[in-house]
Image (cartoon, helix red, strand yellow):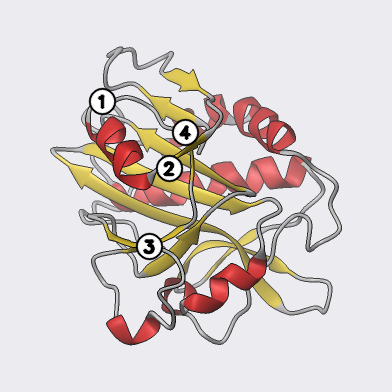
């Protein structure tokens, strides 16, 4: 699971820490590291349940299932998926959770554009969307965040080249009518390193957008 972005330990508004790590880590260990304000690694196969998860949407227990404090419903994580944990102090960057979620979406959309993918937001559906090779609207990235004392936790997941069949054990993010896709499924030849580099190029713009034009005054949890 990588990359990770944090200004919680450094306290530096202009230059938060950006860390990319490798290797598979069991989810409980990864979660403990995040809550200790350390950044995370790639993780093993599992499903997570957000605060709005409906047990009827867990169709199979083929992988471990973990409850989380993030917003959203069930989602899948595993090899071939880039997960970024974003740990930022919104007291320094605008106390607006909706703006934060909007900015994370924009960050990922801009990175995907660098890789030749035309991604977008969808009205009423948090996450990152594009059209698959059949012309269907499909989800390529999920957003799920938790905010504790105005410090953000969790973040985003982008499908690079996971086994999409693994999503069949859940109703991803509670949305049954739309499929999921990935860079590989779209025929895009891009590696994890390529995506990391694209995210890094757009990090400054992402941070600059926080507390800016998308201010909504809303407080709450971002959902997938």
- Cβ–Cβ below 8 Å for labels 1 and 2? no
SS type, badge 4: loop
Distance, label 2 to label 3, CA atoms, is 40 Å
- Horizontal side of 21 relative to 164 (left or right) equals left
Q: Disc 2 vs disc 4: Cβ atoms closer than 8 Å?
A: no
Task: Work out whether 218 lies above or below 110.
Answer: below
- Mark 4 to mark 1 CA distance (whole Å): 26 Å
Q: Residue 41 carries which label?
A: 4
Binning the other alpha carbons within 10 Å of mark 3 as few (below 14), some (14 to 19) or many (20 upward) gives few
Q: Are marks 2 and 3 in contact (CB under 8 Å)?
A: no
Give the farthest residue toward the front.
62
The correct choice, above or below, for 108 with respect to 194 in the image is below
Q: Say above or below: 190 vs 135.
A: above
User: Which label sits in the foreground, 4 or 1?
Assistant: 4
Observer-nearest of 67 and 190: 67
Question: On the image, numbered disc 2 is attached to which residue?
Answer: 213
Nearer to us: label 2 or label 3: 3
- Residue at 47 percent of width and 45 percent of height: 104
- Judge by depth and name the residue closer to the eye, 35 or 132: 35
């Amino acid at each position: 699971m990588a990359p990770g972005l944090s200004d919680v330990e450094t306290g530096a508004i202009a230059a938060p820490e950006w860390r990319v790590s490798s290797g598979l880590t069991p989810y409980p260990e990864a979660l403990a590291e995040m809550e200790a304000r350390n950044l995370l690694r790639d993780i093993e196969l599992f499903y997570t349940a957000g605060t709005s998860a409906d047990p009827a949407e867990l169709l199979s227990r083929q992988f471990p299932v973990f409850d989380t404090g993030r917003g959203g419903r069930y989602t899948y994580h595993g090899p071939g998926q880039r997960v970024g944990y974003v740990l930022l102090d919104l007291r320094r960057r605008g106390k607006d959770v909706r703006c934060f979620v909007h900015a994370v979406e924009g960050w990922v959309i801009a990175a995907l554009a660098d890789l030749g993918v035309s991604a977008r937001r969808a009205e009423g559906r948090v996450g990152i969307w594009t059209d698959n090779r059949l012309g269907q609207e499909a989800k390529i990235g999920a957003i799920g965040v938790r905010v504790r004392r105005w410090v953000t936790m969790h973040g985003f997941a982008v499908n690079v080249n996971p086994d999409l069949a693994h999503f069949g054990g859940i109703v991803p993010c509670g949305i049954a009518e739309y499929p999921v896709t990935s860079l590989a499924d779209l025929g895009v030849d891009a590696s994890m390193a390529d995506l990391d580099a694209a995210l890094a190029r757009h990090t400054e713009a992402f941070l600059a957008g926080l507390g800016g034009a998308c201010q909504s005054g809303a407080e709450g949890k971002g959902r997938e």
